[in-house]
């Protein structure tokens, strides 16, 4: 049941005073902007009791100080001269500790008074009244006068009645603003879902981060994903010091991201705590960007938590409300589900493409190659039966051309064929990774396969090779600014080697070090070797990874160098 404006006044007020109160009530109830409502409450209170100065102090979430201080009656020059606004000490704090009206004939005579800062106008009479919203103290009205006029009991009753109406007006304004915010978040959810379904990789995550920064009025947003089981990676950063945050990597253990990913629930901080404080999850981004209020939101899809959205405001910023946290959490959940749907859609499209390619490859192998082979055999038989050397030589040249065509078709089959086993899969997976890197690179990498790559039957080894190619292409796309990338995989003398070269700027200090360490560990686990350094003529980057096909054998000797001819988007078998 909603209280009526003015309810709670214990004594009858004069008729003229009652009319003034009703006018004041109508004035503050009419507005739905919270900022305007708060300002208007102070102005109306001053008019109602003839106070020269007035202020409304909004109590902070911890209930011990003032989060906001709205004042009237002083010009801008005086406000600048005074400096920082009150934080809730002295008489202002007394109303916070004990929310009951305070009426004084002279502020300075009360022992609770903390005095005034230099440059503050002289004030004598004081009246303070709490404002309650749904039985909780929202803030306090402070009224003062520079002369010796004392506020009366009637003034106190008037302001108390106005405070009751103010509580209703504030509640209405907050509900209205929350409904507007909720509508904005819902529209953003729809728009972002559409963008995520159309975008690729980091583009989708960046769209999420930018929209959260806008709607949450945040100064910094970071999308943090696991780089591996022990390391976290900031893949997207928006706002303050974004360049310093982007590609930051740090241990997962003890971090707030680990806590949120484990629990699947958001965590909210009124003010970011000292990162050295034991027992408190570590908020690593606050060690780079100075933060006040912050929240950590799980990117929780339908199956698992894939990462965390870190959202923060500058020190002194307004804490995130329960409504803001709830709306942002819902948005993060829908965004994570959209990411899953986008990945599932791409997988389905890839499956359809690979199915179609597999059919084409079978047709080429079962029909075209067989027909060419039969034609070649027929021509060879005819050449053997011919006594004319010129004809035999001509036929032999045609047979060679047919053989060359068969070899080219087989290369295309390697490119098209759906994996039917680990060996065939290695080629297809490497080519697939290169195709997936095209949007990020802006061009198609050159790919070469040398030797019997199809004889590789170790699934774990194939996974290692894919990790080498994926990490190398990712670094080239992110950091090098390359215009050319080549990928060579060679099987020779019982060893497998992979070389990825680009013509970019070389390995940057911001490159993902955990990814490079991971490649070295994979090589070492197989008794192999790994090296990364400048490319040919000292330009770009060259990643070299070599392992024996059988564990325990040295990896020396399997060092492929560019030779033969590589065709963009295809594999050359040598």
Image: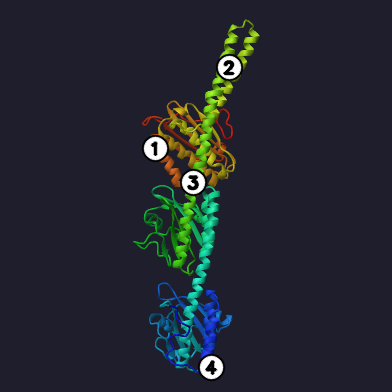
Residue that mark 3 sits on: 343
Q: CA distance from mark 2 to mark 1?
A: 50 Å
Please tell me whether mark 1 sits on a helix, a strand or a loop. helix
Residue 504, position in %: x, y? 57, 42
> Is residue 465 left or right of 24 when viewed as pictured?
left
What residue is rendered at 36% in x and 31% in y?
A: 552
Residue that mark 4 sits on: 16
Q: Earlier in the sequence, mark 4 or mark 1?
A: 4
**How would you rate the neighbour count of disc 2 (Cα within 10 Å): few for under 14, some for 14-19, many for 20 or more?**
some
Residue 372, position in %: x, y? 57, 20
Q: Nearer the viewer, residue 84 or 191?
A: 191
Q: Which mark is residue 375?
A: 2
Q: Nearer the viewer, residue 122 or 539?
A: 122
Q: Earlier in the sequence, mark 2 or mark 1?
A: 2
Q: Are marks 3 and 2 in contact (CB under 8 Å)?
A: no
Q: Is residue 285 above or below residue 396?
A: below
Q: Is residue 423 above or below residue 298?
A: above
The residue mark sitting in front, 1 or 3, is 3
> Is residue 458 left or right of 446 when viewed as pictured?
left
Image quadrant of residue 275? bottom left
Please tell me whether mark 2 sits on a helix, a strand or a loop. helix
Residue 115, position in %: x, y? 45, 85
Is residue 534 at all visible to an observer of this figure? no
**How would you rate the neighbour count of disc 1 (Cα within 10 Å): few for under 14, some for 14-19, many for 20 or more?**
some
């Amino acid at each position: 049941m909603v209280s009526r404006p003015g309810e709670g006044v214990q004594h009858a007020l004069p008729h003229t005073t009652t009319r003034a109160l009703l006018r004041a009530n109508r004035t503050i109830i009419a507005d739905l902007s919270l900022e305007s409502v708060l300002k208007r409450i102070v102005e109306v209170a001053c008019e109602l009791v003839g106070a020269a100065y007035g202020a409304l102090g909004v109590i902070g979430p911890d209930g011990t100080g003032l989060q906001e201080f709205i004042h009237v009656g002083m010009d801008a020059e005086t406000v600048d001269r005074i400096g920082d606004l009150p934080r809730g000490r002295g008489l202002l704090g007394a109303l916070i500790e004990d929310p009951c009206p305070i009426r004084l004939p002279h502020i300075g005579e009360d022992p609770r008074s903390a005095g005034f800062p230099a440059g503050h106008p002289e004030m004598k009479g004081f009246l303070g009244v709490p404002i309650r919203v749904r039985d909780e103290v929202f803030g306090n009205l402070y009224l003062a006068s520079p002369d010796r006029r004392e506020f009366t009991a009637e003034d106190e009753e008037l302001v108390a009645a106005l405070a009751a109406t103010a509580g209703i007006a504030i509640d209405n304004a907050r509900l209205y603003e929350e409904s507007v915010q909720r509508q904005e978040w819902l529209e953003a959810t729809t728009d972002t879902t559409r963008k995520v379904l159309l975008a690729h990789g980091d583009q989708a995550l960046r769209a999420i981060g930018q929209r959260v920064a806008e709607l949450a009025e945040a100064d910094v947003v970071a999308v943090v994903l696991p780089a591996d089981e022990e390391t976290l990676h900031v893949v997207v950063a928006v706002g303050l010091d974004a360049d310093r945050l982007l590609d930051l990597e740090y241990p997962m253990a003890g971090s707030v991201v680990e806590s949120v990913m484990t629990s699947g629930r958001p965590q909210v901080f009124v003010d970011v705590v000292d990162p050295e404080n034991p027992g408190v999850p570590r908020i690593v981004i606050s060690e780079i960007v100075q933060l006040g209020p912050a929240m950590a939101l799980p990117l929780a899809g339908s199956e698992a938590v894939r990462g965390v959205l870190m959202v923060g405001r500058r020190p002194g910023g307004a804490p995130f409300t329960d409504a803001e946290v709830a709306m942002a959490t819902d948005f993060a959940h829908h965004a994570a589900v959209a990411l899953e749907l986008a990945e599932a859609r791409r997988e389905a499209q890839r499956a359809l493409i690979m199915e179609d390619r597999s059919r084409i490859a079978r047709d080429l192998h079962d029909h075209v190659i067989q027909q060419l082979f039969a034609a070649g055999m027929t021509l060879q038989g005819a050449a053997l039966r011919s006594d004319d050397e010129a004809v035999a030589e001509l036929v032999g040249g045609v047979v060679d051309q047919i053989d060359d065509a068969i070899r080219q078709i087989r290369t295309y089959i390697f490119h098209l064929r759906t994996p039917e086993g680990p060996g065939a899969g290695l080629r297809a997976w490497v080519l697939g990774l290169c195709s997936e890197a095209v949007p990020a690179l802006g061009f198609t990498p050159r790919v070469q396969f040398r030797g019997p790559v199809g004889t590789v039957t170790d699934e774990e080894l194939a996974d290692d090779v894919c990790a080498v190619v994926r990490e190398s292409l990712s670094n080239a796309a992110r950091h090098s600014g390359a215009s050319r990338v080549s990928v060579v995989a060679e099987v020779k003398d019982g060893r497998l080697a992979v070389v990825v070269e680009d013509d970019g700027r070389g390995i940057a200090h911001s490159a993902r070090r955990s990814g490079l360490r991971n490649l070295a560990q994979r090589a070492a686990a197989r008794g192999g070797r790994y090296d990364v350094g400048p490319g040919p003529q000292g330009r770009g980057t060259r990643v070299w990874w070599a392992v024996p096909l059988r564990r325990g054998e040295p990896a020396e000797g399997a060092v492929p160098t560019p030779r033969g001819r590589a065709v963009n988007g295809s594999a050359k078998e040598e």
